[in-house]
Amino acid sequence: MQNITQSAKKLHISQPSLSRTIIELEKELNCNLFIRNSRSIILSEKGKHFYRKVKSSLNILDTAVQEVQTSQSPFEKVISLRCEKSSQIIPAVMQNLKQRLPNVDIQLVQRGFEDDWLDHCDFEFSTQKIKNNKNILLLKEEIFLAVSQKSDLATHDFVELTDLKEQKVIMSQPNPLRSIIENFFAKNNITLRPRFVTSDITTQHQLAKSNFGVCFVPQYTWFYSDYSDTVLMHLGPQKLFRNIYLSFPPNKANKKFHAQVMELIISYFKNITGK
């Protein structure tokens, strides 16, 4: 859901100008891209489909521009790496790659995963196997529940899934991790209704610490955040896990520097898990 006035401010244009542009686009496409009410607008199903397609095309264009503008042998020393959404582990992975392969230009691309991408990067970090790609499991990590040391839950051996019906749940904006969590609970006939939503990990942490609510914390990929002032609880009786894969098209496996980058990424994740 989005307020048209707030959107106009973010785009640094007037609200009437944005409204006219949307109306003109809908007329040109001969369909309604948005569902409107008195206070906000949301994307219609056609709007969502159009957004995914346009976003795919723009990301492909951005990648092409980066490749031709790179200063060092753009088509010989460039490796493109895509992540699903903003991930806390990506900066550390990128730093490791740049330190070990200073002469290779690592291009980072961020976008969601649709089934019909027109272009594939050399590597993709994904929480699901990507069809027609080679998928290497980098890690399987448990998803813990962070609770305040003052919470009654902190004295339990684990947190029953049904206990969360009575808790103030803090979650991120929609992203792959949230989808995994929600699908897990849905399979157990529980619908999570977050009391507070923020994608800022520090805010989630501080709210859990102050006993405002509880939040979910991946076992390894948030390893540099200090949760010693909260209690990380197992969910039970069934634990929650997520997988992270390194995925790449088989036809790109022979690309120069590909094997080096792959080995460094695999080694980095092994060091994280201690395996």
Image: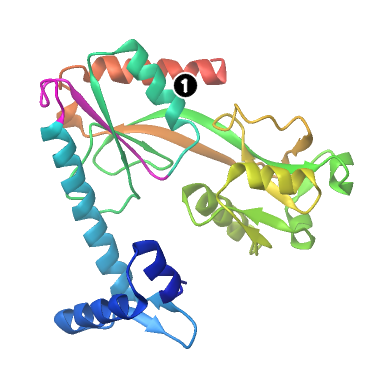
- Between residue 188 and residue 122, name the one nearer to us: 122
**How many residues crowd around disc 1 within 10 Å: few (fewer than 14), some, or many (20 or more)?**
some
How is the structure coloured here?
Answer: rainbow
Residue reaching furthest top?
A: 100
Residue in the foreground of this view, choosing between 110 and 236: 110
Q: Is residue 61 left or right of residue 89?
A: left
Local secondary structure at mark 1:
helix
Residue pictured at 35% horizontal, 64% vertical? 12
Q: To which quarter of the image does residue 17 belong?
A: bottom left
In the image, 73: left or right of 134?
left
**The image quarter in which residue 71 lies:** top left
Picture residue at 21% right of the left edge, 53% below the top: 58
Say which residue appears at 34% left-offset and 63% top-offset.
11
**Residue 76, image x and y in percent?**
11, 21
Is 76 within the magenta? yes
Q: Which residues are magenta?
A: 70-85
Measuring from the top left, give residue 80's x and y in whole percent: 24, 32
Q: Position of residue 258 (x, y in %)?
A: 22, 20
Q: Main secondary structure of the magenta part?
A: loop
Q: Is residue 240 visible?
A: no
Up/down of 196 relative to 125, above or below = below
Query: Can you identify the residue that label 1 sits on?
Result: 269
Q: Is residue 6 visible?
A: yes
User: Which residue is nearer to you in this view: 63 or 49?
Assistant: 63
Residue 95 x/y as whole percent = 40, 21
Asked if the stretch drawn in magenta spans residue 248, the answer is no
Given the image, on which type of amino acid does mark 1 rest?
Answer: Phe
